[in-house]
Image (tube, rainbow, N blue to C red):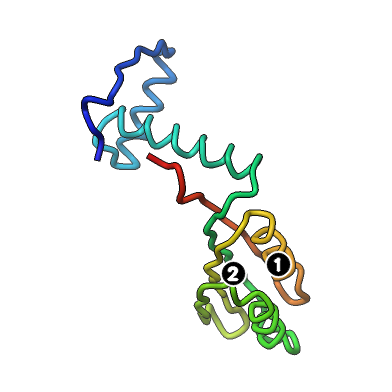
Amino acid sequence: MINLSDTNRIGVSIDSKLLEKFDEKIEEKMYANRSEAIRDLIRDFLVKDELKYSNEEVIGSLTLVYSHDTRGISDKLNQLQHEDFTNVLSSVHLHLNEENCMEIVAIKGDSNKIKEISDRLISSKGVKHGKLVMTSFKNIE
């Protein structure tokens, strides 16, 4: 919750067409108002910058899509996750169709280690696509 005594008002000059597009996006994303949307954008900007330049502890979700027909892929992914069991918090396995599976892996640790773990899992033979999303849970107001 925002402490109003710590809140600052600012003025921003924005082109009317840009503001119109922004207002449309605010409505689409169901923000209560412009201020909430701008605060969210600033937080996202700060988290991305922090992740880029530091090796702080982060949390992440890694999504993998793979063909379960690839020999030993499930065992390989499981083995790799166990090798880093202190960083891998949980995983969920989903059956997408007769051929494809998806695994969602929750991971926590310093950002370089999380990237390393993700790269090993994504580069495993049989993985068709992988995507890591990291966020910081420290210093976010």
Q: Measured from the top left, where is residue 103 in percent x and y?
A: 56, 75
Residue at image x 52%, y 82%? 95
Task: Give amino acid for label 1.
Answer: Ile
Question: If you read the primary sequence from the N terminus, does the residue marked by circle 1 or circle 2 appear first?
Answer: 2
| Left or right side of 22 for 114 | right
Check the image and name the residue furthest to the left. 4
Q: For residue 122, which numbered disc appears in the image?
A: 1
Q: Quadrant of the N terminus?
A: top left
Measure the C-alpha gap from mark 1 to mark 2: 16 Å
Residue 100 shown left or right of residue 30 in the figure: right
In-front residue for pair 6/97: 6
- Could you tell me which residue is drawn at 26 percent across and 31 percent down? 33
Q: x and y percent of residue 96 in the render? A: 53, 78
User: Where in the figure is residue 26, as x and y percent of width and height?
Assistant: 34, 34
On screen, residue 71 versus residue 14, left or right, reads right
> Which of 82 and 138 lies nearest the eye of the viewer?
138
Kindly state the secondary structure of the residue where label 1 is placed.
helix
Instruction: Name the residue carrying label 2.
Output: 87
